[in-house]
Amino acid sequence: MPDQYAVIGNPIGFSKSPYIHGTFAQATGQDMAYAAIEGPLGGFAGAVDAFRAAGGRGLNITAPFKLDAFAYATERSERARLAGAANAMKFDGERVLADNFDGVGLVRDVAHNLNRPLKGKRVLLLGAGGAARGALLPFLEQGPGELVIANRSPGKAQELVAIAEAAGARQVRGCTYPELAGQAFDLVFNATSASLRAELPPVPASVFAPGCLAYELAYGKGLTPFLRLAQNAGVQHLADGVGMLAEQAAEAFEWWRGVRPDTRAVIAKLTLALI
Ligand code: NDP
């Protein structure tokens, strides 16, 4: 029987992970199967217990179970601890290892696929939820010149600043949206969930410096209100989170199987025109 993997979430019908991991497995010749599990709300642990009892080797975790996965694990990576959330688990007997590859996948997409390294750049991160927390440490590892975190609830942005400072960073600031007036950045990331409801975070159009990259973490939504704001402000480099999705999947795949898959084919297949 092939080794069993799956993604668990609720709802799960939309997930691209079975397609992505199926493509990776075929391309790398791995004998594995990858399913989608709709975990019952409030019943995450039971669903994972059943998957493990049936011989499951690893899981990807998507909304709303990333915090449950973190709690379920017996061992957590530093990235997962910082995010307070896990998006991948590996089972080894009684051991349950948890990691969070969202942030490292985002950085890989931006620095490698889009060729926009963060080193020395002015970086703006909108939002301070799970995805922003996951991005914090991988962003800092790239050595941005300045990292500003803006959030609707300012306390959560300040929490991330405190985490960054505890990790030794001195170039991180938190602020409110109105305080962004008059500031411009080389890379602007929308890590709010506003786009999932076709909403726009109240970010001034002046944040986009000439030559800026505007990056929307949501994917499959086409030109979101955030990307439209950037386009109307003259930004020519627009991207959504499809590359991040593929890269976090590649990280999990390598963690499980010890083989690094090439992401180009799945990114090309899943990319929708930003129009
Ligand atoms: P969370 O629910 O953890 O956080 C949501 C964040 O968005 C909070 O900071 C919240 O602010 C802010 N927010 C929500 N609505 C608005 C609004 N109308 N205006 C301003 N701020 C708003 O979500 P996640 O961090 O899990 O996800 C964020 C985004 O990242 C989503 O679009 C998700 O699809 C995407 N994502 C993409 C991945 C990929 O692989 N491409 C992987 C993971 C996430 P407040 O604190 O004030 O409530």
Image (tube, rainbow, N blue to C red):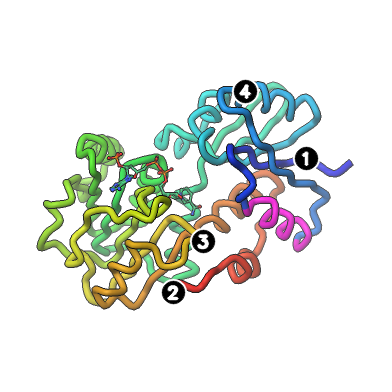
In the image, residue 17 sits, relative to residue 157, either above or below, namely: below
Residue on which the image places disc 3: 220
SS class, disc 2: loop
Considering only vertical position in the picture, is 202 above or below 74?
below
Mark-to-mark CA distance, 1 and 3: 27 Å
Of marks 1 and 2, which one's residue comes earlier in the chain? 1
Identified by mark 2, the residue type is Ile
Badge 2 local density, few (<14 within 10 Å), some, or many (20+)?
few
Label 3 sits on a secondary structure element that is loop
Q: Is residue 26 magenta?
A: yes
The magenta-colored residue range is 16-27
- The x, y position of residue 190, in whole percent, is 34, 56
User: Comparing marks 3 and 4, which lies closer to the viewer?
Assistant: 3
Q: How many marks can you see?
A: 4
User: Which amino acid, mark 3?
Assistant: Gly
Marked residue nearer the N-terminal end (1 or 4)? 1
Q: Point out residue 56 in the picture as x, y percentages from the top left corner.
A: 75, 34
| Front residue of this view, candidates 159 and 62 | 62
Q: Amino acid at mark 4?
A: Ala
Residue identified by numbered label 2: 275
Mark identifier at residue 45: 4
78 or 129, which lies in front? 129
In the figure, is residue 194 to the left or right of 56? left
Question: What amino acid is labelled 1 in the image?
Answer: Gln
Viewer-side label of 1, 4: 4
Image quadrant holding the N terminus, namely top right
Residue 114 placement (x, y as % from top left): 45, 70
Q: Is residue 102 magenta?
A: no
79 or 208, which lies in front? 208
Determine which of the numbered discs, if any, sits on residue 4 in the image: 1
The tag earlier along the polypeptide, 3 or 4, is 4
